[in-house]
Image (cartoon, grey):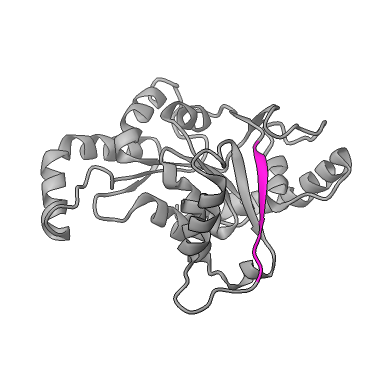
């Protein structure tokens, strides 16, 4: 179901209590990213403070998204789990097997012809296990997720490196491998080294021909290629107020 309102209500119902518990244990104010992380602990309880970049922690993501090139193996493995339905809301998006060569209409027709067996398999399995299916031509996974499934304070994983696009709406969204997606869909915890945090204070506002992409190009130039590995980059300050949700999504996406 698009939006999954009942799931979102459940997340928000538990959020304040879990954040307050985390504040007491850590003895300090928390950033938005930290609040989301502590609110999504697998057992729902904060018994100790986790060390950034060192502690391995079990999380309970709210949802899973998969693109067609990686969903194949993930679903084959999930079928062996014995579950009748995915444990968390999950979706499959058919976009990566469509090559941009001639034009939208012709490219889509070519993809359906070349990869029909894959698309049919993904649709069949999705229907059987209650997984949302976005057919070829329905949209690019990271944009569909931002427009239909992302919500502030949530946590999701996706088998696509651009899953982080959902961060434009204040969601912790992380790209993973198929094995991690299978674990979560099968009702198991998702293990992750507690992320490091990199704070970026934005002052002023965008002007003239500048765009959100200019912001991330500057930040990426400072951090370099591996500078953000294992970390969540969190933006704050008055400059963030001049960025739209889609602009923030662009920054997160890169």
Query: In the rendered view, does 80 fall on the left or right side of 164?
Result: left
Q: Position of residue 86 (x, y in %)?
A: 47, 35
Image: 238 above or below 179: below
Query: In the rendered view, does 18 fall on the left or right side of 229?
Result: right
Judging depth in this view, the residue of 125 and 21 nearest the camera is 21
The reply to whether residue 3 is in sight is no
Q: Position of residue 59 (x, y in %)?
A: 63, 34
Q: Position of residue 170 (x, y in %)?
A: 60, 56
The stretch of residues the image draws in magenta is: 195-203
- Whether residue 83 appears in magenta in the rendering, the answer is no
Query: In the rendered view, does 92 fall on the left or right side of 18?
Result: left
Q: Position of residue 220 (x, y in %)?
A: 51, 50
Judging depth in this view, the residue of 242 and 14 nearest the camera is 242
The reply to whether residue 27 is in sight is yes
Instruction: Please identify the quarter of the rendering in which residue 97 is found.
Output: top left
Magenta: main secondary structure: strand
Which residue is painted at 24% across and 55% down in the image?
137
Instruction: Please identify the quarter of the rendering in which residue 51 is found.
Output: top right
Which residue is painted at 12% across and 39% down in the image?
114
Judging depth in this view, the residue of 78 and 163 nearest the camera is 163
Image: 116 above or below 188: below
Which residue is painted at 23% across and 40% down in the image?
119
């Amino acid at each position: 179901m698009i939006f999954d309102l009942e799931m979102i209500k459940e997340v928000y119902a538990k959020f304040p209590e879990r954040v307050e518990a985390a504040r007491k244990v850590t003895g300090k104010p928390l950033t938005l990213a930290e609040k989301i992380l502590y609110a999504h602990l697998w057992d729902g309880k904060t018994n100790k403070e986790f060390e950034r970049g060192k502690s391995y922690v079990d999380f309970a993501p709210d949802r899973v998204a998969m693109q067609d090139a990686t969903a194949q193996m993930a679903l084959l493995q999930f079928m062996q789990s014995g579950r009748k339905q995915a444990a968390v809301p999950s979706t499959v998006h058919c976009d990566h097997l469509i090559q941009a060569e001639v034009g939208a209409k012709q490219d889509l027709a070519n993809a359906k012809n070349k990869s029909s067996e894959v698309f049919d398999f993904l649709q069949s399995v999705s229907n059987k296990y209650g997984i949302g299916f976005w057919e070829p031509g329905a949209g690019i996974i990271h944009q569909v997720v931002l427009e239909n499934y992302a919500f502030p304070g949530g946590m999701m994983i996706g088998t696509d490196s651009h899953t982080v696009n959902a961060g434009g709406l204040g969601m912790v969204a992380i790209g993973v491998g198929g094995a991690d997606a299978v674990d979560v869909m099968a009702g198991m915890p998702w293990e992750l080294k507690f992320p490091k945090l990199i704070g970026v204070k934005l002052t002023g506002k965008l002007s003239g021909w500048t765009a959100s992409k200019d912001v991330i190009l500057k930040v990426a130039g400072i951090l370099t290629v591996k500078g953000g590995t294992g970390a969540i980059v969190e933006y704050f300050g008055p400059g963030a107020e001049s960025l739209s949700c889609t602009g923030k999504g662009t920054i997160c996406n890169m």
